[in-house]
Image (tube, grey):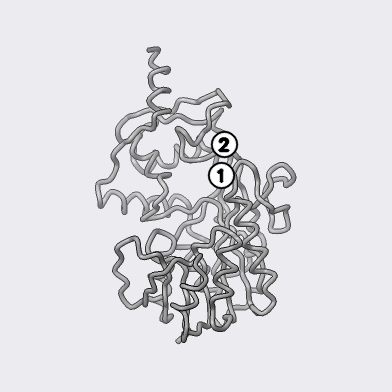
Amino acid sequence: MQKLLLLGGSVFVGRALRQRLVAQGFDVTAVTRGLVPTEWGAAHHIACDRRDVQQLASRLRGHTFDAVVDASCYGPEDCRALLAALPALPTTYVLLSSAAVYQRSTAPLPFAEASPAHGDEIWGPYGRDKAAAEAVLLSASAVPRPFVLRPPYIYGPGNNLDRERFVWARQLANEPIFVPGDGETLIQFVGIDDVARVIAGLLDPQCTVAPGIYNLASETYVSFNQYIALLGQITGRQSHVVHVADPTIPAREYFPFRKAHLVLSTQKLAAWSERPQTPLRQGLQATFDGIAASSDFTVEPSPREVELRRLAAGR
């Protein structure tokens, strides 16, 4: 049984990874800050601040791991601290990075793994810090099999970021959905089940995928307008879409995505049987069913939405 260290494990991506890896027979030890009440089941849990090198080293003392899956690395210091704290470096290290590393101004769509990737101003420090973390891992020559995965928007049951639920809630309540510009901004997704399956596949001793950087995305991409229409097919409701022409109003103040194209090339993993394959419509249906089971479709408009509603009503 492979011994695996998982950074994260209590919320959305980390939780899905923990559940998948335990189910596939890995001996999983998860490191989180311990702030979210969690039923750990067959996984071991270490409550620790990963950025505290001394504390982390103390908690990991006496443990060795065949592989690391890092789902909570947000900057270079996170990666350095872990590499310094591990009693022995693992054979495989999978770092969940982000497509926010790509520089939109210098890289044409779709973004390929070789495109300039030092972060982009629209993502703020997030993209730059993710890119710097990648560099730390890839320069750690003592890790034989480093993998960097760059997903676009991750969706699925348990999503802690209010994206698909945001739109569904407004459709079901017949509330307006304010959309940046003409709604033709292109975005791409990957389902959480695909993320977990790909990572489990990379950890398989028989895996033939070479170490390196990989975009982790479904082949399909959609515009904002198409995305909202697709979500409407699932609810069976018409959407009251209002396009916001004013570019000075930040899109994230009233919509769950920034007004920035995010489309990735999926060619590098195209021949691998474990590549993301879940159709977007199918994955979103499963997500909706999960939310519907908890009846959580309340609408809590942001202050900017309240203002836009007032303006749209002519008041």
Residue sitting at the far top: 314
Which residue corresponds to the image point at 39% horizontal and 22% vertical from the top-left? 309
Whether residue 254 is situated above or below residue 123 in the rendered picture: above
Element on which disc 1 rests: strand
Question: Which SS class for mark 2?
Answer: loop
Q: Which of the image's four quarters has the N terminus?
A: bottom left
Q: Nearer the viewer, residue 79 or 96?
A: 79
- Looking at marks 1 and 2 on the same chain, the residue that comes earlier in the sequence is marked by 1
Answer left or right for 180 relative to 164: right
Q: Which residue is mark 2?
A: 259
What residue type is disc 1 on? Ile
Residue 145 is drawn in which quadrant? bottom right
Indicate the amino acid at tag 2.
Answer: Lys
Residue at position x 45%, y 32% in the image: 254
What's the residue at 31%, 54% (across, down)?
290
Given residues 262 and 43, the one toward you in this image is 43
Q: Position of residue 151 (x, y in %)?
A: 56, 56
Residue 18 in percent (x, y) is at 41, 70
- Residue at 38% x, 60% y is 11
Work out how far the residue at label 1 is from the one at label 2, CA to CA, in angstroms: 9 Å
Indicate which label's residue lies in the foreground, 1 or 2. 2
Q: Nearer the viewer, residue 89 or 277?
A: 89
Q: Name the quadrant containing residue 169.
A: top left
Q: Is residue 214 left or right of residue 87?
A: right
